[in-house]
Image (cartoon, grey):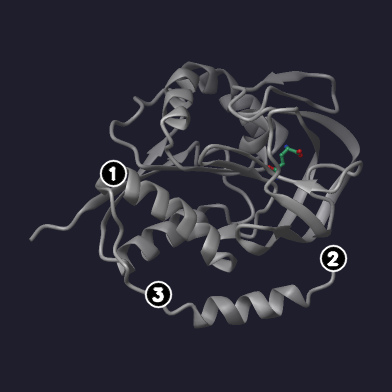
Amino acid sequence: MSKQVIRLLQLYPKDMNIYGDNGNMLVLQRRLEWYGYEVICLAYNPGDTFPHDVDIIVGGGGQDSGQDRIVDDLQVIAPTLRALADSGTPMLVVCGLYQLFGHFFKTKSGETLQGIGILDVETYGESERLIGNIIVDSKQFGDLIGYENHSGQTFLGEHAVPLGVVRLGAGNNTADIYEGARYKNVIGTYLHGSVLPKNPELADFFIRKAVVKKYSEMSDDLIDDHFADLARKAALKRPR
Ligand code: GLN
């Protein structure tokens, strides 16, 4: 019997892919394979044709200059991304793309990079960079462990739901306690690291949502997360 297929799309890997963000693709691919699915990995860069039948979307962070290079193209694919988000397609967007999935990023140099407003957040560049290990208390996924490095400070609008509450580090900003934002199955976060290898429960959230959306039910195979658990234990002890 041929295997069921899940199609992963990485947004802007040429310009938006720092601090190991590509690892998120690798984790989704490998876990899906362990669960018994066939995986097709796709990439979308400025000017490309947006692929059909995408089941999971991931996007990473980038320098302000990288965001500048993709921001116009992002407006072109915004209606497609919005329709996919509205229909429940799971998406993980980290840092630079988290900011641009919000309404705008006003950089420190005064430029406004227009976002696509899937997440009800706004971001303002500040002179202080928020850098270091971060631990976030998320009700649904337990402790989320990652690494942050951003000048933008993000503020939740009234329709935004945070991903969690910061226990170590800064998260969205230095003014409130929140990290990340959610809309349906879209999660925006400042956690690099990459985030998914150390947070398998979060990885399985995207996988489960995608598989159930496409095939109605998901394999009940169990994955041995022994090494991920060891990595989590070590990471939880690290200083900021
Ligand atoms: N350039 C953005 C900032 O500094 C995003 C950084 C990132 O993606 N790590 O806030």
Q: Is residue 164 visible?
A: yes
Residue at 32% across, 68% down: 220
Mark with earlier residue (1, 2): 1
Q: Residue 129 falls in which quadrant of the image?
A: top right
Q: Which residue is mark 3?
A: 223
Residue 42 rendering spot, x and y as whole percentages: 35, 42
The crowd level at tag 1 (other Cα within 10 Å; few <14, some 14-19, many 20+) is: some
Quarter of the image with the C terminus in it: bottom right
Element class at badge 2:
loop
How far apart are the two marked residues, 1 and 3, measured between alpha carbons?
21 Å
| Relative to 80, 34 lies left or right | left
Residue 11 rendering spot, x and y as whole percentages: 48, 37
Kindly identify the amino acid type of the residue bearing the numbered disc 1. Answer: Lys
The crowd level at tag 2 (other Cα within 10 Å; few <14, some 14-19, many 20+) is: few
Q: Front-most of 194 and 208?
A: 208
Q: Is residue 23 visible?
A: no
Mark with earlier residue (1, 3): 1
Q: Which residue is mark 1?
A: 214
Q: Which residue is mark 2?
A: 240
How far apart are the two marked residues, 1 and 2, measured between alpha carbons?
40 Å
| Relative to 216, 138 lies left or right | right
Element class at badge 3:
loop
For marks 1 and 2, give the one nearer the viewer: 1
| Relative to 58, 160 lies left or right | right
Kindly identify the amino acid type of the residue bearing the numbered disc 2. Answer: Arg
| Relative to 52, 140 lies left or right | right
**112, above or below 108, in the image:** above
Tag 1 and tag 3, C-beta contact below 8 Å: no
Mark with earlier residue (3, 2): 3
Tag 3 and tag 2, C-beta contact below 8 Å: no
Residue 120 rendering spot, x and y as whole percentages: 68, 27
Element class at badge 1:
helix
